[in-house]
Amino acid sequence: MAKEYKRYLVTSALPYANGPVHIGHLAGVYIPSDIYARYLRLKGCDVISICGSDEHGVPITIKARKEGVTPQQIVDRYHEIIRKSFEGLGMSFDIYSRTSSKTHARVASDFFRKLYDDGKFIEKTSMQYYDEEAQTFLADRYIVGTCPRCQNDRAYGDQCEKCGSTLSPDELIDPHSAVSGSVPVKRETKHWYLPLNDYEQFLREWILDGHKEWKSNVYGQCKSWLDLGLQPRAVSRDLDWGIPVPVEGAEGKVLYVWFDAPIGYISATQDLTPDWEKYWKDEETKMVHFIGKDNIVFHCIVFPSMLKAHGGYILPENVPANEFLNLEGDKISTSRNWAVWLNEYLEEFPGKEDVLRYVLCANAPETKDNDFTWKDFQARNNNELVAVLGNFVNRALVLTQKYYGGKVPACGELNDYDRETLAELAKVKGALEQNIENYRFREALKEAMNVARIGNKYLADTEPWKVVKSDPERVKTILNIALQITANLSIAIEPFMPFSAAKILRMLLVEPFGWERLGRTDLIAAGHEIGEPSLLFEKIEDDVIQKQMDKLAAIKAANKAAESAQNIDAQKDSISFDDFQKMDIRVSTILAAEKVAKTKKLLKLTVDTGIDKREIVSGIAEHFAPEELVGRQVLVLVNLEPRTLKGIESRGMILMGEDASGKLVLLQPGEKTNNGAIVG
């Protein structure tokens, strides 16, 4: 039997304050978290929902350097954008804090100091990259070079964003500093490490034996890490942005962001309430971390080890991490601007906050990566929210206004079909609870929408617009039931679509009902006067969606152009004009072309240079068929020293161009001219 808890602590992964929030963040973390917290509040539980901006770390300092501003200015800007965006989408955090606050600096410093004083850290000296020109140690993200796997020359010391490979700075080809551009050197530096290996047995018993009910992606990733064996992990960094390491001899060092950030949940709770300890230190509290799958290790291995090392804190009861959401078949990428940004959505789709909440929950990547498409967004709005939910509520209210002047009619004697409908309605509460409490929010949303489907079917089958002519008393019962279903809808959809739930309540002119009344058929008394009905949702037209598709197409084109520009070879060494004059380039016509036997790449070309007819061997067989070359005018370097290839004397070189993708193009005169014309 499941344990009963006195209170709940719900945390949501702290978004990184170097950019806005996008739909991948929402589907993976924040919408599930908000559904869960709203549900618990509706049930009358003691619950607090904690979130805030993660404002330290290397990417923020890199962005600040690029923009010529301070890291504080960067985090101030994006903290406010994120905070307003969350507020606009109806995120019901009890506090939205930040890790640059004074409270957080104190709490994180005290946390580190206790572990330090208790001898829980080990000190290690290692060789790390140092920029002599900038006089600073370089974090992995500050080291740039060529990826050894895909040859991308913009790879970072921790990852190649082009091929996705995880790297170390030592693997990069030709590493250089992103700060000064100079070649870094290795220097000795001292750091503090949390020996995760000391907590391996505890983690095995706590997770592998004690939490087999966790989602398979979470449990599996934890098991994999534990089976491979845990290693000490650094908790400090050589950096000038962050919380200073609070011990002597640590000048120029700050707390590593992965150590600092999760303590942000504790500091935020301290800012929220003086009773913070009952949420963090009482075993009667259930703590649940909502995160994306890229944060599983930090929240299931690292942070619990920190809490265990400190002592006195409870551990998370569950960590329901979601998979990733893709966008139009491609991985969401902040660096490539391939995302739907929440702040932009709220500006471009005013009044449609619940549409995004609905679509992202209905398509949530709970068990596997899923894909967001604008066409699916439009279809779910038009075919589900407008045609099912909105349609039912509108019909129930409009018919009540039409037949009874907006006053709720009394319910008469129920027939078998009425009782069947109400029995089906009564089942929804249990199904919703079962799914939400097991973090199956997609299924829960289906159950909430099922209330509207029950109502639509009931109206369609009873046809009050026809029956009113022959049996007006029966219509009173039908519409009373329809209005009770509408009131139930306001409860069932509130965790998922709070704006729409509130709108239903305003149209019914009633106060919120509370979760315990879900499934009841006496929510609205006979004689109560409802308000004027209005549409809950509006159809989204094709041109609106096309505008978003065009926006993404422009982003894709810009990314492709930028990628091509990145891969253009650097300019070669300068030559004198006299050296250039030595090159004899002539317009020539290809008379014949054939593959060179026993080779894949070579073609033998017979060309008319205007001077003579000669043979040239060219390595272009994988790019051109022989027959498509015959008759073409090309540019030939005719005074290149002859070479013998596969027994053929090659006298000259066909001039070609190669784009960033490796595609070859023939360089040709702009218009047909005589063979032998000199290029220069």
Image (cartoon, rainbow, N blue to C red):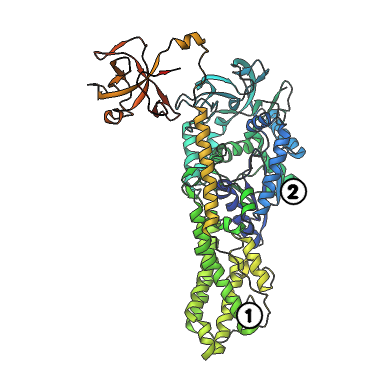
Disc 2: which residue = 272
Q: Is residue 381 left or right of residue 406?
A: left
Q: Is residue 428 visible to the viewer in this orientation of the structure?
A: no
Determine whether 298 is above or below 412 in the image. Answer: above
Residue 465, given in percent of the width and then of the height, sits at 53, 83
Residue 106, given in percent of the width and then of the height, sits at 75, 36
Q: In this view, does 197 lie to the left or right of 505?
A: left
- Which residue is outermost to the left? 597
In the image, what residue type sits under mark 2? Answer: Leu
Based on the displayed image, in which of its 4 quarters is residue 657 positioned?
A: top left
In the image, what residue type sits under mark 1? Answer: Gln
Determine whether 468 is above or below 92 in the image. Answer: below
SS of the residue at dot 2?
A: helix
Q: Nearer the viewer, residue 80 or 557?
A: 557
**Sequence-wise first label, 2 or 1:** 2
User: Badge 1: few (under 14), some or many (20 or more) residues near its Cα, within 10 Å?
Assistant: some
Foreground tag (2 vs 1):
1
Identify the mark at residue 401; answer none if there is no mark.
1
Residue 619, given in percent of the width and then of the height, sits at 32, 21
Q: Nearer the viewer, residue 174 or 615?
A: 615
Based on the displayed image, in which of its 4 quarters is residue 679 positioned?
A: top left
- Which residue is outermost to the bottom? 470
Residue depicted at 62% across the width and 53% down the height = 348
Residue depicted at 70% across the width and 35% down the height = 111
Residue 606, given in percent of the width and then of the height, sits at 27, 20
Separation of residues labelled 2 and 1 (CA atoms): 46 Å
Tell me whether circle 2 and circle 1 mark residues in contact (CB < 8 Å). Answer: no
Residue depicted at 68% across the width and 80% down the height = 528
Q: Is residue 545 visible to the viewer in this orientation of the structure?
A: yes
